[in-house]
Amino acid sequence: MMNGTQYLISLGGYVDVDKYRYVYFVFFLMLYVLILFSNCTIICLIWIHRNLHEPMYIFIAALSLNSLLFSTAIYPKLFVDVLSHRQSVSHSACLLQYLIFYSLAGSDFLLLSAMAFDRYLSICRPLQYATTMGTTSVTIFLVLAWFLPACHVLVATAISAEQKLCHFILKGIFCNNSIQKLYCVKPRFLTVWGLFVLTNISLIPVLFILFTYIKIFMVAYRSCGEVRKKAAETCLPHLMVLISFSCLCGFDVIIARLESDLSKTVRLLMSLQIVVYNPLFNPIIYGVKMKEIWKHIKRLKVPVLNKKH
């Protein structure tokens, strides 16, 4: 307890910060700049070029925006932790990071669901695509993808804010569900609500995505080579992102919910993957694997080459 504010240790005990302070700082700073650059490039390309003003690319831009927001909620605090002798965070700031982290995670699942539905209509119901996936529908999907998870997680955050803390050492480099282990008494309702949120904003969307992609691959298998090529070019990147993101979220659930007893090194490496892998993996996959986006990325090199000559 310091000046009436409760503090949690967020990084202590995981790495030798004092010995490698500036190495960690440079490492995280380079990662943050790379994440900002890659995601901003995807967003700007989709914003500028009219041929990318389609539902699929709009949802990709929304995913990149989520990566920017998520990284901005995590990395500045990591910079402070690395450069500080004491890695601490106030209870309220920790809950805010918790809210942003899980809201954006749920938003990613819903955005991937919207992308799967878009691909399903485009490949399996092409005659209905133009009327179903209009501007209004895309706007509704975007609003729901950001609003619903935020409302779900806000309830858990409000309940957590009322809990008394008996422990003050958080096992992690940022605030996630592990904060619930610090409460003197964990409310049963919080556990039930957490399972409800997990089902609504992750399990159901994943099942929906798998269902739509099974239908897509069945149609592609019975169709001509052009349809198969279209399905492979547009669906495989989404599946790669879904699989990687689901694995990382599964780790968070296993560690925080099931209270698995893993070593500090394993916890640290997996936590770093959450803050590094997903924000950086998405723009690389969509930039390289999505044909139209890759065309515009290659054109960005042309002015640089001309200047050299």
Image (cartoon, helix red, strand yellow):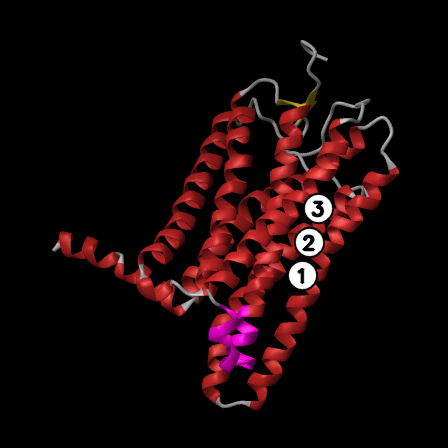
First reached walking from the N terminus: tag 3 or tag 2: 2
* Magenta segment: 118-133
Instruction: Give the quarter of the image for residue 283.
Output: bottom left
Q: Is residue 186 above or below residue 6?
A: below
Q: Is residue 222 above or below residue 14?
A: below
Could you tell me which residue is drawn at 63 percent across and 73 percent down?
Answer: 212
3D distance between C-alphas at marks 1 and 3:
18 Å
Amino acid identity at mark 1: Pro
Could you tell me which residue is drawn at 65 percent across and 36 percent down?
Answer: 98
| Nearer-the-camera pick, 98 or 83 | 98
Kindly check if marks 2 and 1 are in contact, taking CB atoms under 8 A apart as contact: yes
Q: Residues within 10 Å of mark 3 (few under 14, many from 20)?
A: many
Q: Residues within 10 Å of mark 1 (few under 14, many from 20)?
A: many
Image position of 27 (left or right of 10):
left
Secondary structure of residue under mark 1: helix
Instruction: Give the quarter of the image for residue 36.
Output: top left
Residue 197 is inside the magenta segment: no
Q: Residues within 10 Å of mark 2 (few under 14, many from 20)?
A: many
Q: Which mark is residue 18?
A: none
Q: Which residue is mark 1?
A: 205
Q: Which residue is mark 3?
A: 252
Name the chief secondary structure element in magenta: helix
Image position of 175 (left or right of 184):
left
Q: Which residue is mark 2?
A: 201
